[in-house]
Image (cartoon, helix red, strand yellow):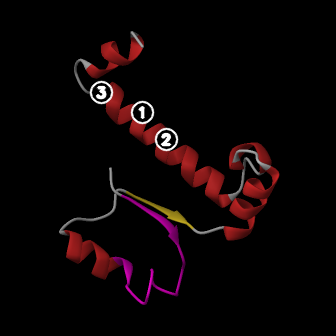
Amino acid sequence: HLVLNRLQKGFGWGAGVKRRQAEKALGRAFDYCIRDQAEILTEAANRGCPVLDLRRYSRFGRQLRGMLKRSLRELSARPGLAAAAATR
């Protein structure tokens, strides 16, 4: 999966590169976009704890859980992968 992390609404991405420009350059769309919530990520890093333990229902937390759930659904639908994951 291709993930765009720390997307900032209205400000583009990186040094003025817009999301659509990045997708065009890559030749594909991002599978997931996780919006930036720097204050929560910084607080979690400073406390030494996972973001989901600190602010479980933040926008970042909801987007991260959604990405993980979708990825797990897609992986479990692939033949052979569910059985391989169950043996680990």
Q: Which residue corresponds to mark 3?
A: 77
- Residue 72 location, x and y as percent? 42, 33
Give the amino acid type for the residue marked by disc 1 in the picture. Answer: Leu
Q: Residues within 10 Å of mark 1 (few under 14, many from 20)?
A: few
Q: Which residue corresponds to mark 2?
A: 68
When the figure is inspected, residue 75 is found, relative to residue 81, above or below; the finding is below
Residues under labels 2 and 1: Cα distance? 6 Å
> Could you say which is closer to the camera, residue 42 or residue 69?
42
Whether the magenta-drawn stretch holds residue 75 is answered as: no
- Residue 86 location, x and y as percent? 40, 12
Q: Secondary structure at mark 3?
A: loop
Q: Residue at x 42, y 14 (%)?
A: 88
Which portion, as a residue range, is magenta?
A: 3-19
Give the amino acid type for the residue marked by disc 3 in the picture. Answer: Ala
Which numbered circle lies on residue 72? 1
Give the amino acid type for the residue marked by disc 2 in the picture. Answer: Leu
- Residue 46 location, x and y as percent? 79, 57
Which numbered circle lies on residue 23? none
Contact, mark 3 vs mark 2 (Cβ under 8 Å): no
**First in sequence: mark 3 or mark 2?**
2
